Image (tube, helix red, strand yellow):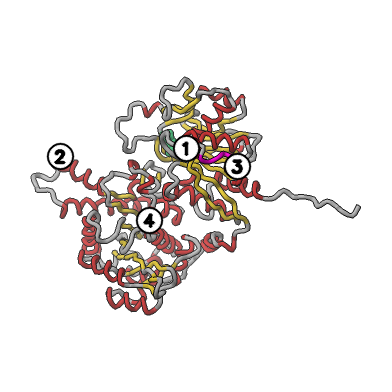
């Protein structure tokens, strides 16, 4: 049955989110938060990201420069904002939800080569803009076909900052969409920053005014402006922005710093974003049903934390936390769930190799995590750290590359296979305990060619993995070219490391664990991609629990002195 109380026409409604002033002011969090609010409001919501770069997807980009490559269940290698949306919406997205200039141009040029344009001169307007609109509408179609009710709201974030050359065709396409879909079916939210000038302690609205001018020059008049600022935006500033941008006063929404990103939906709600959106898109204004969301967001307040645990993240890309953004979130979800604050410290594994840092420095951590990675640099340091954590009974979690290097470390230090290696790091090793996946032997191109996305995994009975997950069947996301060579299984198990979960009918090892250790586990898959606030991924939850236990001081019974 349809749900008339939602009051939507059959048409999908689009909310386009642009950014001004600076990059990195949390546009993705605004999109995620608005999506969350609208979903709590009872609407079927989806969100998509436009990335104006020429890469076809994020998979070929260096995470130091561009941040983490987020992997969707259908194997898309996408921008990390999709991770933000998935975490807010608690919903899986697909590769279709990330549109790039590369995909658009590739499609247009392939069509031109096929002769689809019948002799026309192929141009940015209308051919490229048409292709963009087609891609955006395709997302709506997919959502509609999944949905049992008419009408959905799709949030589309335009990457970059207004004024960038690269994003012009996208802005032009969404400008046209307002014309084609109608004012009641399209909404423009512009996200800006009001910096505080320290000398006068006053927030400045001029950059916002200028970026709106830039947007209007392109032909887009924003309907709502969300202003990031350190504190709540003053009424004076709101009035000034409203006057100079022609945006109604109650559509200037303050987005102040908050204890965690999960508080942003409540902040935006309090400042009236839902009423503003509802009025413009003609959505009926109804009471919100927060469900359990407030408990979830409150669990991320510092007041909720009884413990602080320090996790040492041993990696190569330590210079930029964005490279491991989902790992950070998964740790914080696991922490908040059990009243613990997880502080992450980055350790450059290369320093262990060069003897610039002693392995003993790892002793102070409540847990050690080796995340995913590629290539030789820093890998020997990670192998040493994996061994140290095992020998010194420090809770340990290895993810993908971390799983592979934990295998190498165990082979060398426990199974006495001294020259054990991964063929990614030494193609000529006599003992390739980690070797290329058979499917990777013929790979010619770098893009989208790894073993990617969700695969079903079977967990074995009587294992820690089974205890943690409480089930024999899980589905997890992957992004790798190498894997454990099963011919070493017997010798590993004889020496106390068990491979406890497998995919592809037992052909691929997915989880390793060491008994007689407080917590030593590693996964070939990336559990961080499916962790959500309020429902942390089970492996992360158990790892953080073990870290909390390591921290807890052992109970000492005071000695009586008066005997
Ligand atoms: N480099 C390793 C592989 O390709 C691990 C990849 C990863 O950690 N994502 O298999």
Point out the tag, 4 or 2, that comes first from the N-terminus.
Answer: 4
Would residue 2 be visible to someone looking at this image?
A: no
Q: Are marks 3 and 4 in contact (CB under 8 Å)?
A: no
Taking the image as shown, residue 463 lies to the left or right of residue 223, namely: right
For the residue pair 447 and 323, the one nearer the viewer reads as 323
Cα distance, mark 4 to mark 2? 33 Å
Cα distance, mark 3 to mark 4? 38 Å
Task: Residue 340: give x, y in percent of width and height.
Answer: 59, 55
At horizontal 57% and vertical 28% (from top left) the residue drawn is 413
At horizontal 40% and vertical 44% (from top left) the residue drawn is 71
Find disc 4 in the rendering and name its residue: 46
Taking the image as shown, residue 261 lies to the left or right of residue 212, namely: right
User: In front: mark 1 or mark 4?
Assistant: 1
Cα distance, mark 3 to mark 1? 17 Å
Q: Which mark is residue 113?
A: 2
Q: Are marks 4 and 2 in contact (CB under 8 Å)?
A: no
Task: Residue 9: give x, y in percent of width and height.
Answer: 32, 64
User: How busy is the neighbourhood of tag 2: few (under 14 within 10 Å), some, or many (20 plus)?
Assistant: few
Q: Is residue 83 above or below residue 153?
A: above
């Amino acid at each position: 049955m349809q749900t008339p109380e939602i009051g939507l026409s059959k048409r999908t409604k689009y909310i386009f989110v642009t950014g001004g002033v600076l990059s990195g002011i949390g546009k993705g969090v605004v999109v995620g938060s608005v999506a969350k609010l609208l979903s709590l409001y009872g609407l079927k919501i989806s969100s998509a990201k436009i990335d104006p770069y020429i890469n076809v997807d994020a998979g070929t980009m260096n995470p130091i420069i561009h941040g983490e490559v987020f992997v969707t269940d259908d194997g898309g290698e996408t921008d990390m904002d999709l991770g933000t949306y998935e975490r807010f919406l608690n919903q899986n997205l697909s590769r279709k939800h990330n549109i790039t200039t590369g995909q658009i141009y590739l499609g247009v040029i392939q069509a031109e080569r096929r002769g689809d344009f019948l002799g026309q001169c192929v141009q940015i307007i209308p051919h490229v803009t048409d292709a963009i609109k087609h891609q955006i509408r395709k997302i709506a179609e997919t959502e509609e076909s999944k949905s049992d009710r008419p009408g959905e709201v799709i949030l589309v974030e335009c990457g970059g900052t207004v004024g960038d050359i690269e994003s012009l065709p996208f802005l032009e396409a969404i400008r046209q969409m307002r014309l084609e879909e109608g004012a009641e079916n399209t909404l423009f939210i512009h996200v800006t920053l009001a910096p505080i000038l320290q000398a006068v302690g006053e927030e400045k609205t001029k950059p916002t005014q200028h970026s709106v001018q830039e947007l209007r020059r392109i032909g887009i008049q924003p309907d709502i402006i969300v202003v990031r600022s350190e504190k709540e935006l003053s009424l004076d500033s709101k009035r000034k922005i409203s006057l100079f941008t022609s945006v109604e006063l109650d559509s200037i929404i303050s987005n102040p710093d908050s204890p965690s990103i999960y508080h942003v939906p409540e902040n935006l709600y309090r400042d009236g974003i839902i009423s503003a959106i509802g009025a413009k898109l003609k959505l009926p204004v109804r009471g919100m049903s927060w469900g359990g969301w407030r408990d979830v967001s409150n669990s991320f307040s510092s007041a909720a934390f009884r413990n602080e645990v320090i996790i040492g993240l041993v990696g190569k890309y330590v210079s930029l936390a964005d490279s491991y953004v989902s790992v950070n979130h998964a740790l914080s979800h696991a922490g908040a769930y059990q009243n613990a604050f997880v502080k992450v410290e980055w350790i450059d594994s290369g320093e262990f190799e060069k003897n610039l840092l002693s392995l003993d420095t790892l002793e102070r951590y409540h847990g050690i995590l080796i995340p995913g990675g590629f290539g030789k640099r820093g890998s020997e340091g990670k192998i040493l750290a994996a061994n140290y954590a095992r020998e010194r009974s420090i809770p340990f979690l290895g993810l993908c590359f971390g799983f592979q290097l934990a295998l190498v470390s165990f082979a060398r230090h426990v199974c006495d296979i001294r020259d054990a290696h991964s063929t990614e790091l030494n193609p000529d090793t006599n003992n390739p305990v980690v070797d290329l996946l058979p499917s990777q032997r013929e790979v010619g191109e770098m893009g989208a060619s790894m073993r990617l996305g969700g695969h079903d995994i079977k967990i074995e009975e009587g294992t820690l993995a089974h205890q943690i997950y409480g089930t024999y069947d899980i589905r997890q996301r992957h992004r790798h070219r190498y894997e454990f060579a099963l011919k070493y299984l017997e010798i590993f198990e004889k020496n106390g490391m068990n491979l406890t979960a497998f995919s592809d009918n037992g052909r691929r090892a997915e989880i390793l664990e060491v008994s007689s250790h407080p917590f030593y586990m590693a996964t070939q898959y990336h559990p961080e991609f499916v962790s959500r606030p309020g429902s942390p991924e089970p492996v992360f939850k158990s790892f953080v629990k073990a870290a909390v236990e390591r921290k807890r001081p052992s109970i000492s019974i005071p000695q009586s002195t008066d005997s």
